[in-house]
Image (cartoon, rainbow, N blue to C red):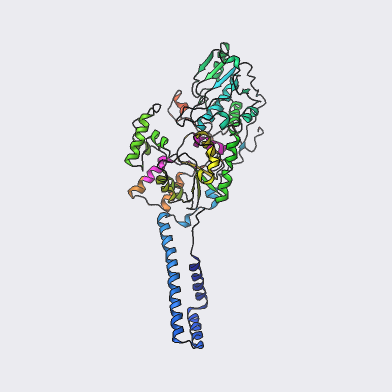
Amino acid sequence: MIHKRRDGHPAAERWAEIEEMAKNRGHSHVRTSLAAKLLQRNASPYSITLYTILLFALSIFIFVFYSKDILEDEQKKHLFPENESQRLPDEKLWGAPYSHGLHPCVKPTAKYKASQGLDRYMTVKSNGGLNQMRAGITDMVAVAHVMNATLVIPQLDKRSFWQDSSTFSDVFDEVHFISSLQGDVRIVKELPKKLESVPHARKHFTSWSGMSYYEEMIHLWNEFQVIHVAKSDSRLANNDLPLDIQRLRCRVMYDALRFSPPIENLGKLVERLRFQGGRYIALHLRYEKDMLSFTGCTTGLTDAESEELRIMRENTNHWKMKKINSTEQRNAGLCPLTPKEVGIFLQALSYPPSTLIYIAAGEIYGGNIHLSELKDRFPNVILKEMIATQEELRAFVNHASQTAALDYIVSVESDVFIPSYSGNMARSVEGHRRFLGHRKTITPDREGLVELFDKLETGQLKEGTTLSDLVMQLHKNRQGSPRKRGGPLPGLKGRARLRTEESFYQNPYPECICGPKSGLQ
């Protein structure tokens, strides 16, 4: 149920109409007319007393409800202190940024040739969560093309934090994956039986490698028929690759890796959201237990909660950082926004309290205790469990990748997407939305926001017009407008600079997004 602001109780509105009529006709005239009618009727003292009591009771009734509305308005002004005159028009709040006629372009050039594969096979073990695996699988398709290999359907990560037993066909449409790429790479479901026992070349390909690296790796076929890739994430460079390789990556990411039919069918959650509220924000609220523990961020948590997260971090062997200063992390903008901070942020952006917000995330740490800090300002917070039946969600229990796929669909199709932290899903969804026409994506400037939040805490700044102006100024160029992909941070050399480049999957412009005059589609 969407909570709408009540502008006034009906009785109060009727009372206002009567007052307006009195103003138009003249108060003295109304009183004179009423007195004249009473005198003309020669009413008895009992009748006059009864009328007086009834009028008095009616006045009390109207006063009580009118006062209630005033009290509610005052409470809302205290909680939502924005200046209504500063409320942005709907187009500013919900409209996509101007795309300058840009559109997707993924067709190969005239020089492009599909790889044959022949009897050379590449097996892949994906690693990470859903979106890390999607990017890795996409990279491996491109690598298989460069190395002229037949790609065996990749294995999904079953040893990550989530312990998800999902197979490739549980998450993705395997038939579509194979058929849609038949003009690019030969793909088979399994390695031929005759090759299962032959020696394999086990490789950890170097991260962010370019064409020359993989062309050099082709020599492995002189000794082996099978190359096993032990990790798939970030194996291919973001930049300086041939146009056809970049466009192949886009064809894989945005078409071939379609989710499995059960997941796509439950994508009707989008329709249910629109039925409830029309437009909605998809909020990727990274406030899960593992994320807070990994980042060492404890702002707003109790001492007991902070200790629980510290113990979890100590006991997770593959997390290298054990001792983390939460304050330093937060001041550097390296912490996810808290539910309370998200509420302040959205309010400062002028989104009204009635805004429908879908939480695209796993279980929120602390449950409703922490989530209520967002719901106090925006009551219409929706979890997937609120718009899907238990029967519909039963198949996704203990399958984090499949659940994340649902959130991905709802996020890509949302009117506005806002991530509280810049992880793999945030980057993937942003890139997909750019590819589809630069749909509105607001990326919080966490470091800048922390400074404002701290001033609120110390009383140097108050919520309202001033805060709103500062937040809007801070984010005027962070709403998904077209721009070229960001390069490495200045001053870095060697492979370290590659790590700081903006991900190709976060912004596939300009290779996969063309201008209106481009003849190549």
Question: Which quarter of the picture shows residue 189?
Answer: top right
Q: Is residue 30 visible?
A: yes
- Residue 418 coordinates in the image, percent (x, y): 49, 42
Seen in the picture, residue 276 relative to 121 is either above or below; the reply is: below
Query: Relative to residue 171, is residue 351 depicted above or below?
Result: below
Residue 31 horizontal/vertical position (percent): 48, 81
User: Magenta stretch: residue 270 in it?
Assistant: no
Q: Nearer the viewer, residue 439 or 45?
A: 45
**Residue 335 shown left or right of residue 273 in the figure:** left
The answer to whether 11 is drawn above or below residue 263 in the figure is: below
Q: Which picture quadrant has residue 97?
A: top right
Q: Main secondary structure of the magenta part?
A: helix
Q: Position of residue 255 (x, y in %)?
A: 61, 33
Does 311 appear above or below 62? above
Quadrant of the image containing the C terminus: top right
Q: Is residue 483 visible?
A: no
**Image-based side of 29 in relation to 329, left or right:** right
Residue 451 colored in magenta in the image: yes
> At 48% across and 78% down in the image, what residue appears?
27
Closer to the camera, 253 or 49? 49
In this rendered view, identify the residue nearer to me: 30 or 498.
30
Q: Percent from the top left, x then y, of residue 414?
A: 55, 44
Q: Which residues are magenta?
A: 424-453
The image shows a total of numbered marks equal to 0
